[in-house]
Image: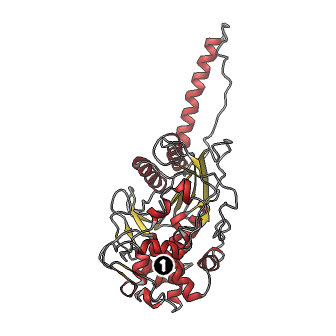
Amino acid sequence: MFNRRHKLLALSGAVAALAITVPVANATDRSPGAAAEKSLAAMLDRQDAAVEKSLDELPGRRQDTAVRKSLRALVSEDGFPGALASLTDRNGRTRNYTAGVGNLKTGAKVPVDGQVRIASNTKMFTATVVLQLVGEGKIGLDTPVETYLPGLVRGEGIDGRNITVRQLLQHTSGLPDYDEEVVRDYLTKQRHRYFEPREVLGLALAKKALFAPGAGWSYSNTNYVLAGLLVQKVTGRPIGEEITDRIIERIGLRHTYWPGVGEQTIDGRHPHGYFATAPNTPYTDVTESDPSASWAAGQLIGTPSDLNRFLTALLDGKLLKPELLKEMQTTVEAPDLDTVGDGRYGLGLATFKLSCGGFAWTHGGNAPGYTTRNAVTADGRAATIAVTALPTTLPAAEHVEQALDTALCS
């Protein structure tokens, strides 16, 4: 649920089409001029279509049309209640889009650039803080976790003396995930439950190691819970505070924040989030829920445009020194990362290939009620999409991936 076997599904969006209104005859009009008026209306409709086609050739319009179409399809064909997206071009200009409804009960519109639970995108923030502390000489990337959290990481085939900080951030530690335990009976038992970080860590350590450290790759939220505990140990401050001070306030993310202990609501303008247990089953509104189970692996709330701003600032070197950004971008094969199987993962940052050539830097996040996908290209284009439910079918997940590719390649 919280991005085990993470799928990099990212941007789609929509912008209102240009509407040209013309007078047409009443359908019940049987006067002698009715046929002529209908003929005139048909001619004007053809002219409107021609105008729309020519407008599609204007800079940016073709992209808007493609993005709008893919975003609407996510709602009408894949059944997501609502979708919102933000695109930022290489010059920093941003366009925001919405589709569907923001509240199934009232029919309210999706708020433009509304706040959502950005889930595992939080891992990028946590990894950035760890790397900043590496730059300050407080953490060593290739130092065993045991150095900072003595005696904590123990289990069957699990020993913190053999797992490095790098392996945590890279998902090559072999540590099992705890996600199945915290989402089992989600609607009836887990939705409003508060979890302490060491509680979910205990759920993971009760399992057997997946492989020896460094011998494979497997996406595990456990790695980032440990990274959060590590940050708190060396700084003496909460991970949420460190993320806020070192990233959110530093680059001016005005609508991104770390929820307080026990906080279950979303502060700002936001679409409601929904959860279905299987395809073609009714949605349950899960907007109010406790995100503590994901903690340093996925607790943040933010907007699509803020995610674009963060990714752009990160890749522009505004948060990390060049040598540390290079470490973050040094990737390993991650065959379960996306549906195509060509994804690669660095230190809290991943890549996927674009159909138009090259690749994009990304992460994405899943939480009950919200799916976010985002990416930034080498030339500085950024895109984020959020849909207000988790995919319940593989095709729906693939369509969000395709929407991201459309947004960045059209």
Residue 308 is drawn in which quadrant?
A: bottom right
Is residue 356 visible in the rendered image? The answer is yes
Residue carrying label 1: 226
Position in image of residue 320 (x %, y %): 53, 81
What residue is at 47 percent from the left and 75 percent from the top?
Answer: 202
Type of residue at label 1? Leu
In the picture provided, is 28 more to the left or to the right than 330? right
Secondary element at tag 1: helix
What residue is at 36 percent from the left and 64 percent from the top?
Answer: 343
Q: 321 and 173: which one is in front?
A: 173
Position in image of residue 205 (x %, y %): 42, 75
In the depicted structure, whether residue 196 falls above or below residue 290: below
Model colouring: secondary structure
In the picture provided, is 241 more to the left or to the right than 347? right
Q: 52 and 378: which one is in front?
A: 378
Position in image of residue 407 (x %, y %): 49, 53
How dense is the environment of label 1, judged by Cα within 10 Å: few (below 14), some, or many (20 and up)?
many
How many numbered discs? Answer: 1
In the depicted structure, whether residue 56 falls above or below residue 113: above
In the depicted structure, whether residue 285 falls above or below residue 352: above
In the picture provided, is 276 more to the left or to the right than 31? left
What residue is at 54 percent from the left and 42 percent from the top?
Answer: 282
Is residue 93 visible in the rendered image? The answer is no
